[in-house]
Amino acid sequence: MTVSIPNMALAGVKILDLSRILAGPSSTQLLGDLGADVVKVERPDAGDDTRKWGPPYVADKDGELTNESAYYLSANRNKRSIAIDLASEDGRDLIFELLDHADVLVENYKVGGLAQYGLSYEQIKDRYPRLIYCSITGFGQTGPYAERPGYDFLIQGMGGIMSLTGEPEGQPMKVGVGIADVMTGMYAAVGVLAALHHRDRLGVGQHIDISLLDAQIAWLVNGATNYLADGKLPTRLGNGHPNIVPYQVFGTADAPMILAVGNDSQFVRFCKVADLLHLTTDLKFSTNPARVAHRQEVCELIEGALRKRKRIEWLSELEGVGVPCGPVNNLEDVFSDPHVKARGARIEVPCDWARDGHVRLLANPLKFSKTPASYRRPPPRLDEHREDVLKDWLSSNK
């Protein structure tokens, strides 16, 4: 049966999720965390492609590996799964019945892909005038690339982030997770919330067209705006910052650390601790613009000083005087960090088919004082909730 928590921010909102992979599912997972009732529509034969994107896979009660990959688990909690064959007349009819009760439809088919089933926005907008219809694609509904399929890695390359990422003499590098997908999902969730508010005021739904490439370019932020301001192509700086120095990884006597000096007063405090106070009166280093202009020279001097002592000593002293700094953590370090534990970044969601009786997932980072996120359901197995969904949404068993 459905689990409803009336005081949740999105309680009562029904979302029909026709998306798969990461951008769409991460968006609907976020909305589900905030209380929306999300029904995940999947292909009867295999379901969401990411179910098999492993290893690793989750083990069942008997210790046998399931078809549920960790990748799939990352973006599909707080949903119910129903398998529907859109190529069949019965399947299409069922989708139309579900849409009679839906507030939002989220899909990431290729442009025009749902038209063959009579489910494009133009085909259904008059029948469902209050529906929020969110289309997530690689390149958008318009433009010369609209028909192309889009993948995160491809978008990171085309959208410019790889030109800014990596060592100066090395290859352009992608971000280590599907960040173009995830950020597109975030923008999509914001768009859905805005469209719901508009509908609540004026009574009409609308179409949201969000693409991976558009979103990728939007979150280039200062990297792109620097270029737009002066027309100069930025170069890769490794772990350095284009506008702030020192703001990068430095070696110490035993382990790397991050030094993130954001202003000149912090630089003075750092120099006092590092016995480099003479740098604060040198015109080449005394201000941030000067340090940016003499980046290599000042960073070599700083690293030379930092390598004389161990990281833990530097972190203790610099934190004590308010200089931003920190370790470079691996994931074991991250999840054992006392602050991360205190903030509840790792959660365990009860799951009756998993070996341990739960699955370990990442928490929603939003902290609400009145309507907190909740973790009501583990990521569903394929077609796990057919009877529940049909009963709850259609008030009948089919």
Image (cartoon, helix red, strand yellow):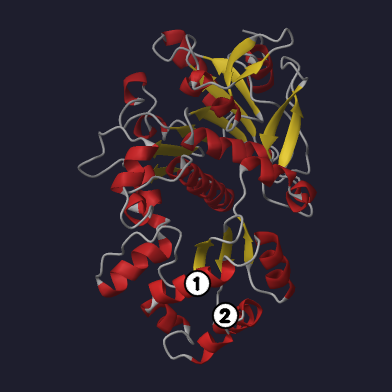
Please identify the quadrant where the N terminus is shown: top right
Q: Which label was assigned to residue 108?
A: none
Kind of residue sitting beneath label 1? Pro
How many numbered tags mark residues here? 2
Residue 194 in the image: state x and y as whole percent: 53, 52
Q: Measuring 78% from the left and 39% from the top, which residue is drawn there?
A: 6
Residue 313 in the image: state x and y as whole percent: 71, 65
Dot 1: what SS? Answer: loop
Instruction: Answer whether labels 2 and 1 touch (C-beta < 8 Å).
Output: yes
Residue 269 in the image: state x and y as whole percent: 64, 81
Quadrant assignment, res 314: bottom right
Can residue 244 be seen here? The reply is no
Say which residue label 2 marks.
267
Where 374 sits versus 221, above or below?
A: above
Kind of residue sitting beneath label 2? Phe
Say which residue label 1 marks.
246
> Is 149 in front, or is 201?
149
Q: Is residue 232 left or right of residue 94?
A: left
Where 305 sits versus 70, above or below?
A: below
Q: Is residue 133 left or right of residue 117?
A: right
Residue 363 in the image: state x and y as whole percent: 69, 41
Where 80 sits versus 36, above or below?
A: above
- For label 2, the crowd category at 10 Å Cα-Cα, with few meaning under 14, some 14 to 19 and many 20 or more, is many
Q: Measuring 61% from the left and 40% from the top, which residue is drawn there?
A: 31
Please identify the quadrant where the C terminus is shown: top right
Q: Is residue 34 left or right of residue 52?
A: right
